[in-house]
Amino acid sequence: MKIVKWLLIALGIYILYTTVEAVGFKTIMGHIVSLKFQLLPLLFFYPFIFYFDTLGWSYSFPKKLPDNIPLRNLYFIRIVGETLNAVIPFSASLGGEPVKAELLKRRYDIPLSEGFASILIVHTTFWISLNLFVIGGIVMTLKTLPLTPLLWNSVLIFLIVLGTVAVLLIIGLHYGIFRQVHAIGNKWKWWGTFSYAKAKKFLKLDDQIKRFYTTNPKRFLFSIFFNFLGWFTGVFEVYYMAKILNMPIGFAEAWLFEALIQVLRIVTFFIPSSIGAQEGGIVLIFSQFGFPKQLSLTFAILRRVREIAWISFGLTLWSFIEDKPVISPKKR
């Protein structure tokens, strides 16, 4: 399995290399250097995306968060977790999720069961809101920028698969999926002598999630809504990047392109940070609509540069959070 993972990294790097080689490194750098200070605003879209995503997460906890956890602190914890999702190899973009739960436990005494429950719930609202976002982008551009058969078939399969997974996960979480996992593990002797302790953890996690779905339907809808706003904020970034690159893309078309790029990122999750696959995929998407490769690859590299900048910020922030004294929690 490790060999396969290293091969995936090698494949991603190879795709990136061949894509850059086909366009020309000097051509790409010429485009980027010519933009100068126009690049700076690209750093200011992501904080708003994180803000809405954090709001979506705040509404996915089984209980309302205590007052000693301001949204700002939850925001920082989420940045750290998402940064680790991006940099931890072979974790399918999930390596930072346990860190979020651990930081909530260590700093604010939020039980791990509640932390993990919120993470599982917010992933379902993420997927549902992403489906709505992708559908919205397609509907907005049906007449002005219809999908090619290749993109249409790919997106249709994605929507069906992601929608089905989201619905099944919600049903499973509501009816106690972890209780069933523990029962199967107990039957096949997976847990050994720690069965009782593991059973308590599984049952508590099930109870936390079931409580959310049965008593907090409004919070579930709010989580979907704010996650949708997070996806939608990315449209402004695409629109701005297209403008500074002189690509004739309106706001509705920017919505479609952002939706397709997010589909690409989800589909290529098995390649660490989607390296190579993201760049090559963006070039493929734009080429389907007649955009030249040099502009498409410049667009893709600018997104990667922005991503690297925020990863650097997230790693720096993690070091500060780790060193900062723990705030005394209030009774819940």
Image (spheres, rainbow, N blue to C red):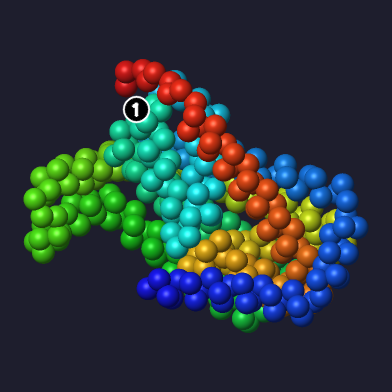
Q: Position of residue 209 (x, y in %)?
A: 30, 43
* 126 to 283, vertically: above or below: above
Q: Residue at x 82, y 67 (%)?
A: 28
Q: Residue at x 79, y 56 (%)?
A: 241
Q: Position of residue 320 (x, y in %)?
A: 54, 32
Left or right, residue 162 beside residue 228: left
Q: Residue at x 91, y 58 (%)?
A: 34
In the foreground, 49 or 30: 30
- Three-letter residue code for mark 1: Asp
Left or right, residue 140 beside residue 109: right
The image quadrant that residue 260 belongs to is: bottom right
- The reply to whether residue 89 is in sight is yes
Which element carries disc 1, helix, strand or loop? loop
Residue furthest right in the image: 34
Left or right, residue 261 beside residue 288: left
**Which part of the image, by quadrant, shows the N terminus?**
bottom left
Q: Residue at x 18, y 51 (%)?
A: 179
Q: Position of residue 270 (x, y in %)?
A: 48, 68
Q: Residues within 10 Å of mark 1 (few under 14, many from 20)?
A: some
- The reply to whether residue 253 is in sight is no
Left or right, residue 287 beside residue 65: right
Residue located beneath label 1 in the image: 109
